[in-house]
Amino acid sequence: MTDRSRLHMAIQKSGRLAEQSRDLLKSAGLKIQAHKGQLNARATNFPLDLMLVRDDDIPTFVADGVCELGIVGLNVLEEYALGQPQVGVEVIARLGFGRCALKLAAPAGQAFALADLEGSRIATSYPRLTRRFLDEQGIAAEVVTMRGAVELAPRLGIANYVCDLVSTGQTLEANGLEPVLTVLDSEAVLVRTAKTIDPDRAAQLDQLTTRIDGVIATAESKYIVLNAPESALPDISRILPGAEAPTVVPLVGRQGHVAVQAVCQESVFWETLEQLKKAGASAILVMPIEKMML
């Protein structure tokens, strides 16, 4: 029996997404106690238990309300949702890690056009997503479901094409294939159950998701401090990437000059600093943000 006084979150039990999910929770201030080989773990400083399961079981755990929260690849969630009349799972945040793409791949060097898929056989571990793509394109093709070694299908004569997850593309290349179409761009997402949650656990859930929102916002955000002539403020505000209204403070002893402080919620590149300097900024500092609460 699970402890219903605590929140429950389903995450992948092993692999890159599992490690990144744990890193996210660690960045949100959670201390996770886990023992090798167990299928659950516990936060010692927050009322949260983790269920360590297969990635394709996570949507079921969340939809059934066994877990209030889950971290899963969008590709897995979409494949699950296409098979359910009522999904029971709500995406509440894109997490920015675990990025990959479900791509249709053809034999390398072979001329390809969308019409070539008509009447073909396509091997995939994502039959519903592949079928949805074909239906949207108005293409009649046979979808061959495989649970592994999808890239071998053309070589073995099982299929003409494959539809599989691609991160670096090395596996496709090693099997004489190359991606030709993107079916779905995917990343890890935070999901919650659509079932009713009691008030105490709902408050815990809001607290945890607020922390996670802060971690996500911090990942790309930078704190910028600079000096500039007051007349340059319109140009500088336009250049600052993803910043809300900056804080502007007069500089003592330098009439007409100000200090500008801003949180930039997009990447800050060297080109950005060069543009700021050209606009009149000086003494530009760019600092990482350890924590942020939105």
Image (cartoon, rainbow, N blue to C red):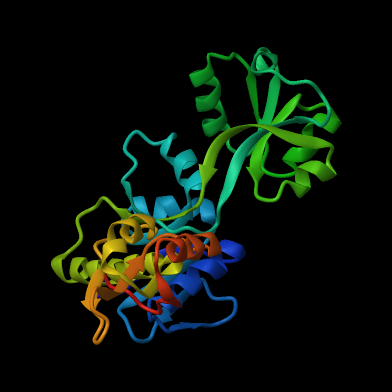
What is the quadrant of residue 4 in the picture?
bottom left
Please name whichever residue, 258 or 148, is drawn nearer the observer in this view of the structure. Answer: 258
Residue 25 drawn at (x, y percent): 42, 73
Residue name at image x 30 percent, y 54 percent? 193
Residue 222 drawn at (x, y percent): 41, 70
Please name whichever residue, 64 or 163, is drawn nearer the observer in this view of the structure. Answer: 163
Please name whichever residue, 249 or 102, is drawn nearer the observer in this view of the structure. Answer: 249
Residue 77 drawn at (x, y percent): 45, 46
Residue 110 drawn at (x, y percent): 82, 24
Query: Which residue ends up furthest to the left in the rendered image?
Result: 199
What is the quadrant of residue 277 in the picture?
bottom left
Horizontal arrangement in the rendering, residue 103 relative to residue 65 (left or right): right
Q: Quadrant of the C terminus?
A: bottom left
Horizontal arrangement in the rendering, residue 19 relative to residue 168 (left or right): left
Relative height, residue 285 to residue 54 (above, below): below
Please name whichever residue, 218 or 197, is drawn nearer the observer in this view of the structure. Answer: 218
